[in-house]
Amino acid sequence: MFFQVFLRNFVTVKCVTMNKALIIDYLNHPNPIDLFEKAKQIKSETVGNKVYLRGLIEYSNRCAKDCYYCGIRASNKKVLRYQMNDQAVLEAVEYAYHKGFGSVVLQSGERQSQEFTQNIEALLKKIMTLTNNEIGITLSLGEQSEDTYRRWHDAGAKRYLLRIETSNKALYEKLHPKNHNYGARLKSLQTLKKLNFQVGTGVMIGLPYQTLEHLAEDLHFFQDMDVDMVGMGPYIEHADTPLYETVGARHASPLQIENRFDLTLKMIALLRILMPTINIAATTALQTLDPFGREKAIEIGSNVIMPNLTPLKYRENYFLYDGKTVVRDTFDDTVTDLEARLARVGAEIGYNLQGDSLHFKMKSA
Ligand code: 5AD
């Protein structure tokens, strides 16, 4: 009842705010049906029922970073390192283009070098030529210099994803080695905004030492940064990482694995209410915890899905966390299957649409 009255009152207000205590109440609630209903309603009134597809190409798992939670961290010697050649990337792009995916995401481990900058720049130009400048390109290649970001923007990439991982500096520092710098990550996000990228960020949910208060702060962080896109998903342990070795699967936090799925759905619903016009991804990690995870997220707030287009031979080496779904069907099967799954939650694929963030378009208008 309390939730209902609150929701009815604030939804007419344009600039939606919600204090930390209330967000925490929702996150604590075992099944806040009114929250989900309100998020559904807001979604249908703003971004609508179209789901945009971003073909995910995991370009390389070489990584200079050493994040304590991540399976492809530099110190994990068990990982076979790869970098796709341009031809393989272009084949994946061509597939996406012909199937009417509005855009692709090029993702890789973080590396900063002149050679890497140039490789990506050249590759972007080839992608633009191949698709008559029609496909949207999102990059997810970590922290880079302003000059590098500018060159990639000029070469055709108009969107960038860089998760802050957690907006709480102290927690960030617990999860990363000393030479990883929260301030630098934040600065990268600000640079991307300055360069007029559509900017996406995100966090992991259910990290060791993380509290519901941190998660509430993360939602406020997205609002304060005025981001255009968010991708957030559950933290899932990876056995070959220091975080798992020191903390294990059942860490002290209340955010145990069995709660993380529901918690992520609640975070997505809250975010849809707080930022009605942004793009919100239904992430792969959600699908790892529940075979219908992505569809459930679409139902209550998300409007973007990133089908994996990485060739299978590479995919097995891009394990950020344990149990990551390696789909073995053909891509055509995957898309047909996705259509049927989305129809069941009243959503449909926005074919041939780049699906720019409405939030970004409204700011730029
Ligand atoms: N569990 C869930 N997500 C993870 N990522 C990295 N490691 C894990 C993990 N163990 C996420 C990070 C990164 C994105 C590419 O993958 O948030 O930004």
Image: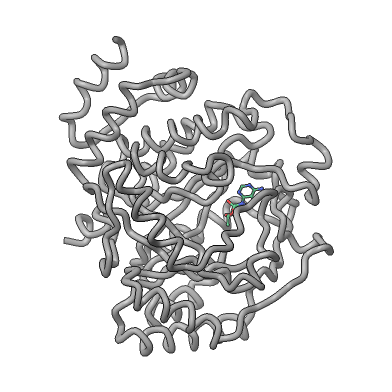
Quarter of the image with the N terminus in it: top left
Question: Which residue is drawn at the image coordinates 57% and 33% (left, top)?
Answer: 260
Q: Name the foreground residue: 235 vs 25.
A: 235
**In this rendering, is residue 175 above or below 85?**
above
**In this rendering, is residue 104 above or below 188?**
below
Instruction: Please tell me in which quadrant of the rendered image residue 257 appears.
Output: top right
Q: How many numbered marks appear?
A: 0
In percent of width and height, residue 276 lies at 27, 42
Question: Which residue is drawn at the image coordinates 50% and 58% (left, top)?
Answer: 162
Q: Residue furthest top?
A: 1
Q: Name the foreground residue: 71 vs 164.
A: 71
Q: Is residue 143 left or right of residue 236?
A: left
**In this rendering, is residue 113 above or below 143?**
below
**In this rendering, is residue 194 above or below 344?**
below
Q: Is residue 343 left or right of residue 160?
A: left
In percent of width and height, residue 74 lies at 76, 63
Instruction: Please tell me in which quadrant of the rendered image residue 35 appears.
Output: top left
Quarter of the image with the C terminus in it: bottom left
Q: Is residue 81 left or right of residue 289?
A: right
In percent of width and height, residue 312 lies at 62, 70
Q: Name the foreground residue: 131 vs 296.
A: 296
In percent of width and height, residue 232 lies at 49, 45
Question: Which residue is drawn at the image coordinates 45% and 82% (left, top)?
Answer: 124
Question: Which residue is drawn at the image coordinates 46% and 22% (left, top)?
Answer: 24
User: Which colour assignment does the render follow?
Assistant: one colour
